[in-house]
Amino acid sequence: MPMSHLDLLTGLLLNLLVILIVILLISFQYLSRNKVHKLHIQPLSIFLACSLLLVFSLGMSVRLEDGFLYDLRFIPFLLGGIYGGNRVLPWLAVTMIAIRVPMMGPGLWVTVVMAVLFAIVIMYMRQRLENKAWKTKVYWYTLLAFVYSILSLWVPSLIFHFHYTNSFLVYSAVLSGSTFFVFYLCEMIRTIYILQLEAIKYEKMQVVSHLAASMSHEVRNPLTTVKGFLQLIQEDPANVSTNSELSKVAVSEIDRATEVINQYLNFARPHPELEEEVGIRDEINRSTDIIMPLAVKKGIILKANILHHHSIMGDPNKLQQVLINIMKNGLEAMESGGTLRIFSYLENRNVFIVINDTGIGMTKEQLMRLGEPYFSMKGKNGTGLGMMTAFQLTEGMKGTIKVLSKPGKGTSVILSFPIYEGEESVRSMTPSSQVRPSLR
């Protein structure tokens, strides 16, 4: 290949490299600034970027004949016309002519004719291709670049009698291929933007869906308890003292349902998290009192053993919600009866609460999915949101959840919370409080 051809190829490839670098930098800056909330670039920004690329292209142009310079300036000109529209394209045509004027030569008139002619062609093509698939657009832009290469090099070579057939082939191939590659890249970036926008909208819809389903699940728990208590009252209406206690618990459960609804309604506006000293013994006792009627109805033995009087920092309603969700799951895992044990102990300045059932257990694969939305062991009767809520609320109180289970041997859920270090909370441990009970 003669040196002139090699120089032309080298210059055009360097020109392409600069165009690609500028496009990627602008795309990265645009993505970081807008955070993909909208897909719109100001026409002025497109004009400035394409004008900069025109200057770079002309600066790296290759001279084939006196007064004739060849480069990839058509690509930024086409980019600005396609993505900037009619507000940008005429000014880009003026810019392309203006930066070519200082170099003069017969090639200046070729530049003027090509700028005006292709500005009109691009305006027409942009309207016709607006609703076409992006691949179709890329093919048409590539064909337009090939036509440009013919009119800008081959036709002038015939008119001004400089015959560079090999140079024309190099220029035409590089310009057409570069146009295809650049516009393919731009359309892919635009597609990624659009997909991210759609993903954000879908995620928002998923959040609303999860919120509604979770709210339904959390409100159903206290309502189920109230229904059970009302059934017990109906079975023995003459037992005034017992029914009075059941009614009090039922009212408290309705209050808890109201509190759950208020919590979900407050998600839309910022509000401080409730943090206060929460007595572990008191909350476990309240939770077992609430879940006891369901356990009795299923023929399940409920045992509670709290080996300390320590407290944690958090929201008592949320802790009660976590305990009830986990205990209810344990009861539902024992269809043919069994034993549900709840015990708590202190270890390494952490309070541990263990809820152990003798139910069907879970496999390793099921354990790995525990806490995912809509994953449930109850089939169509479960939403999978109980454990998801338990994980979220526990994490919000700086706690952790660990689940141990084997098929056919039951499940143990271990909650861990940092101990509250207040003067009223920290007491001298008795010998029994330092013994860690067995999970079975």
Image: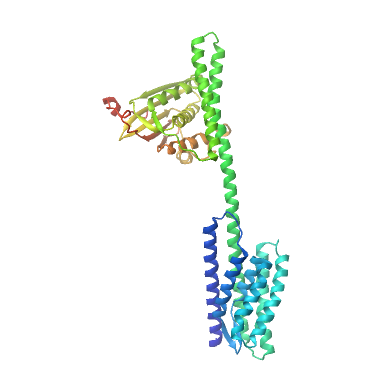
Left or right: 217 in relation to 150:
left
115, above or below 410, in the image = below
Q: Is residue 127 visible?
A: yes
Residue 93 rendering spot, x and y as whole percentages: 65, 75
Left or right: 412 in relation to 93:
left
320, above or below 145, in the image = above
Q: Of all residues shown, which one is farthest toward the top?
A: 238
Residue 338 rendering spot, x and y as whole percentages: 45, 23
Which residue: 56% across, 17% down?
A: 231
Rendered image quadrant of residue 424 = top left
Q: Looking at the rendering, in which quadrant would you find the C terminus? A: top left
Q: Can residue 383 be seen in this view?
A: no
Please, which colouring scheme is shown?
rainbow
Rendered image quadrant of residue 83 = bottom right
55, above or below 262, in the image = below
Q: Looking at the rendering, in which quadrant would you find the N terminus? A: bottom right
Which residue: 60% across, 52% down?
A: 198
Residue 107 rendering spot, x and y as whole percentages: 64, 85
Q: Of all residues shown, which one is farthest toward the bottom?
A: 161
372, above or below 22, in the image = above
Query: What is the number of callouts on the image?
Result: 0
Which residue: 51% across, 24% down?
A: 253
For the residue pair 301 and 433, the one nearer the viewer reads as: 433
Residue 118 rendering spot, x and y as whole percentages: 69, 75
